[in-house]
Amino acid sequence: LECQLRHSQKMEAIGTLTGGIAHDFNNILTAIIGYGNLIQMQMDKSDPLLHYLVQLLAATDKATCLTKGLLTYSRKQPLNPCHADLNDIVKRVTKLLSRLISENIDFSSILTERKLCVTADSGQIEQVIMNLVTNARDAMPEGGTIIINTDVAELDDTFIRNQDYGHAGMYALISVSDSGVGMDKVMMERIFEPFFTTKEVGRGTGLGLSIVYGIIKKHNGFIQVDSEPDNGSVFKVYLPLTSNNATEMHVKPQNVQIGGT
Ligand code: ADP
């Protein structure tokens, strides 16, 4: 518990710091992009300097993406919660993701037929799933399998005692499993830290999982990881079910193929 508390305090402090910087930085970038666009509009299309300006604006665009990520991470993005069925969110985002997954990856989802009523910011939950699936994709350059599962899970007092917040009860579970490179224990300790990445410069910022962690915590949910080197990884996300969740629906899982080969 002490370790969990230290972790969450550290994340809180880094969040406040990066949030402040990202906010000011964002204003500066807005000015750069604005003036850059003005120059571009007045420039002759044959001007040899136009090429440099386009490069400059592209780099500024990348910086904007990064500050957006930082702002999300620092939880400056307000939560816009509404009642939703988690399965609908998963279906929506998997449709989008199947376009980003290459041919050599078998991407499928097995969704429970039970309704998973949650009070959540759909956009932010979509972002969680997108980050987890893109990480899974990046963990298997040679191809493999990614499966998204949804289910109902009961979290008991023992589970909650090991967290620094939350309550026992019924949760919606989304798990993202991959057959990729996996991780050892030392690495698993660090993956939720902002800026921790093993990806090459330009491919990873190390913010993906810290954003995921922030979003899930804001929703009073939990995230757990199971992994072994060379043996793939499973990321499990638990979100509290709203009390009026319909439980009478069928339990039989439904296998849906959503992309890949
Ligand atoms: P980024 O994707 O920019 O590196 P993340 O915070 O999303 O940042 O991930 C941090 C690191 O955690 C990754 O660089 C990678 O080393 C590791 N990681 C995350 N997901 C997986 C996965 N499914 N399999 C193996 N390693 C992973």
Image (tube, helix red, strand yellow):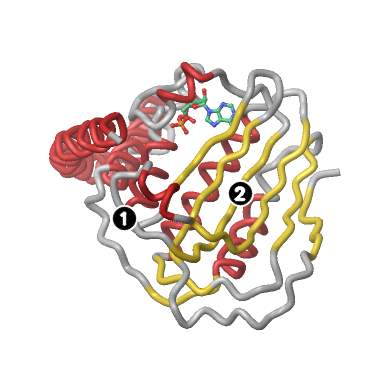
Mark pair 2, 1: CA separation:
19 Å
Point 59% across, 58% down: residue: 93
Label drawn at residue 160: none
> Of all residues shown, which one is farthest toward the front?
158
Q: At x 65% / y 83%, what residue is drawn?
A: 248
Q: Residue furthest right?
A: 261
Query: Quick one: SS at disc 1?
Result: helix
Residue 71 falls left or right of residue 244: left
User: How packed is label 2: few (under 14 Cα within 10 Å), some, or many (20 or more)?
Assistant: many
Where residue 169 appears, as percent x and y from the top left, is: 45, 64
User: Does the Cβ of the disc 1 residue fall within 8 Å of ligand 1?
Assistant: no
Q: Residue at 75% across / 46% down in the picture?
A: 107
Q: Is residue 51 left or right of residue 250?
A: left
* Residue type at the position of mark 1: Lys
Task: Check disc 2 and report the residue beneath it.
Answer: 175
Circle 2 sits in a helix, a strand or a loop, which is it?
strand
Identify the image quadrant of residue 181: top right
* Nearest the eye: 175 or 128: 175
Where 167 sits versus 46, above or below? below
Quadrant, the N terminus = top left
Q: Which of the 4 image quarters holds residue 140?
A: top right
Residue that badge 1 annotates? 218
Q: Position of residue 196 (x, y in %)?
A: 39, 23
Count of labels in the image = 2
Question: In this picture, is 58 found above or below 159?
Answer: above
Which residue sits at x=16%, y=34%?
13
Up the image or down, 2 lies above or below 176; here it is: above
Q: Position of residue 256 (x, y in %)?
A: 79, 60
Which of pointers 2 and 1 lies earlier in the amino acid sequence? 2
- Residue placed most toward the observer, 180 or 238: 238
For badge 2, the amino acid type reads Ser
